[in-house]
Image (cartoon, rainbow, N blue to C red):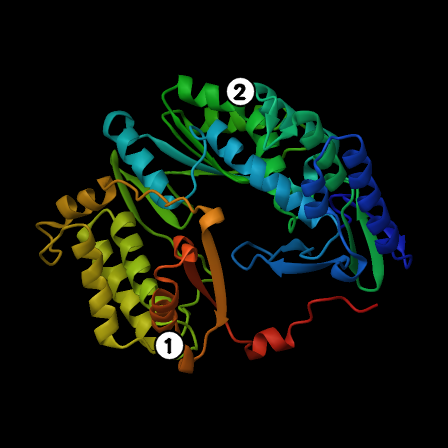
């Protein structure tokens, strides 16, 4: 907290009552001025008995030297959380659209980009570089962060989003960013720099700020036929520059903005997004990377969760192994480690084998993977088009949630049978029911203190 100077101590004076009053008054003023609709006002306004102040806790970064702490401000019931989520729902997709050519969302996406680039550009002296942006969320100045949001909307030439004028979005964003309060260790604090890590809008604003900061860097790398991608506060670069020249460039980039500090790792092998990449004599080799803090713990098979959730784990993990492992030997090694981990978590061999086979059959591969067919089969999986998400028509959909337990295994089937029986010829049958499960409270949930006690 001292390091970033992002938090101002307010002592023992609770800011919550005043914050509730100011939030509702601000929304009412916008409503009376017709900046927001009555429906939006009702959606965003808050009731005193439904909110509580955020509280600060720390998560250790066990994979980093010295085990630094990451501050998390848990504000699920914070007075501004409704506004934050509302704005983020409007803006996140727009940022993704604007930054799509310089960001990645997964190690698999990076592999696809790397494969294409390496066939033409990789040489024996090609280097990889990963860069970490130090304390991004608490280093982005609040005013400049909101301005970067405005710059994005101007660049996209938008005048309104979701029936909201751009000026209204900026005003609400500024209110969210400047009104982050939380309690910690009996004291109350106001965040005067950056945004709360637990607030949805913080990620989008930080991403916007980084996007405009890195424009010159991206152009420099790509003009030299290099590859540049960002994932939140981590950056990946591969380029055919001498190491000394890249270090000099990073030193220069660190002078672009006093709020952004870049810490680099350069070599012929690096790790990024659980992906290990290595340049071996001009050839790209990849495999799964596991952090030093990794433990082979997955959702136990004997836990009270729906079976489809458990089956999805071996399926997804093996699919990742095939996508990430560029050689048959590394794939075999990863597959056996995965099998051992699943067995330790009580998964039956039958389920493991069934899901491993399902991965292959899903992509039309009808033979076991061998050293002869591995590269061809793997490339087929990598090149398979990504399944588009089905859009949900919320006006014709009803969501039904129930607490899952062993006695409720057949509830979804029985529910749909009864629905079809009683509503088959009714107009309500145009509504599609979607069932979702809630997990029962476990010991960990019961022991976790969710609200700070003063």
What percent of the width, then of the height, locates residue 404? 46, 74
Is 312 or 115 nearer to us in this picture? 312
Q: Which residue is mark 2?
A: 216
Q: Alpha-carbon neighbours of circle 1 within 10 Å: few (<14), some, or many (≥20)? A: few
Is 361 or 9 nearer to us in this picture? 361
Q: Secondary structure under badge 2? A: helix
* Labels in figure, total: 2
Residue drawn at point x = 47 percent, y = 30 percent: 97
Q: Quadrant of residue 453?
A: bottom right
Which of labels 1 and 2 is toward the front?
A: 1
Residue drawn at point x = 44 percent, y = 23 percent: 221
What percent of the width, then of the height, locates residue 363? 19, 50
Q: Are marks 1 and 2 in contact (CB under 8 Å)?
A: no
Q: Tell which circle, 1 or 2, labels the residue nearer the N-terminal end.
A: 2
Q: Quadrant of residue 239?
A: top left
What percent of the width, then of the height, locates residue 452? 76, 66
């Amino acid at each position: 907290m001292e390091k970033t100077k992002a938090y101002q101590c307010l002592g023992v004076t609770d800011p919550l009552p005043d914050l509730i009053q100011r939030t509702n008054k601000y929304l009412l003023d916008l409503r009376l001025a017709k900046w927001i609709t009555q429906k939006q006002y009702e959606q965003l306004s808050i009731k005193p008995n439904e909110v509580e102040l955020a509280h600060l806790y720390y998560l250790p970064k066990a994979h980093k030297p010295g085990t630094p702490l990451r501050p998390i401000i848990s504000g699920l019931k914070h007075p501004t959380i409704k506004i934050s989520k509302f704005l983020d729902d409007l803006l996140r997709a727009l940022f993704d659209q604007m930054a799509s050519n310089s960001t990645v969302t997964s190690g698999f996406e990076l592999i696809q980009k790397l494969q294409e680039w390496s066939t033409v550009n990789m040489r024996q002296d090609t280097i990889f570089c990963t860069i970490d942006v130090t304390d991004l969320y608490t280093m982005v100045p609040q005013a400049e962060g909101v301005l970067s949001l405005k710059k994005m909307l101007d660049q996209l030439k938008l005048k309104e989003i979701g029936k909201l004028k751009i000026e209204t979005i900026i005003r609400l964003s500024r209110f969210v960013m400047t009104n982050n309060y939380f309690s910690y260790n009996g004291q109350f604090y106001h965040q005067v720099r950056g945004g709360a890590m637990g607030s949805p809008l913080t990620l989008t604003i930080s991403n916007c700020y980084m996007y405009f900061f890195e424009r010159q860097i991206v152009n420099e790398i790509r003009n030299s036929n290099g590859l540049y991608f960002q994932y939140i506060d981590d950056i990946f670069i591969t380029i055919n520059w001498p190491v000394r020249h890249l270090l000099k460039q990073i030193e220069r980039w660190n002078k672009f903005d006093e709020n952004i500090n870049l810490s680099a790792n350069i070599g012929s092998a690096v790790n990024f997004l659980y992906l290990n990449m290595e340049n071996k004599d001009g050839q790209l080799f990849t495999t799964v990377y596991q952090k030093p803090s990794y433990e082979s713990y997955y959702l136990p098979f004997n836990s009270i969760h729906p079976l489809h959730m458990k089956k999805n784990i071996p399926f997804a993990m093996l699919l990742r192994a095939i996508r990430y492992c560029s050689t048959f030997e590394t794939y075999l090694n990863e597959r056996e480690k995965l099998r051992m981990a699943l067995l330790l978590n009580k998964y039956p061999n039958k389920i493991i084998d069934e899901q491993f086979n399902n991965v292959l059959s899903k992509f039309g591969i009808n033979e076991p993977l061998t050293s002869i067919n591995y590269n061809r089969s793997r490339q087929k999986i990598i090149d398979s088009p990504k399944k588009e998400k089905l859009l949900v028509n919320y006006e014709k959909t009803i969501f039904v949630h129930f607490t899952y337990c062993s006695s409720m295994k057949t509830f979804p089937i029985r529910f749909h049978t009864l629905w079809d029986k009683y509503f088959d010829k009714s107009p309500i049958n145009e509504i599609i029911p979607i069932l979702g499960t809630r997990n029962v409270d476990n010991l960990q949930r019961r022991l976790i203190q969710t609200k700070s006690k003063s």
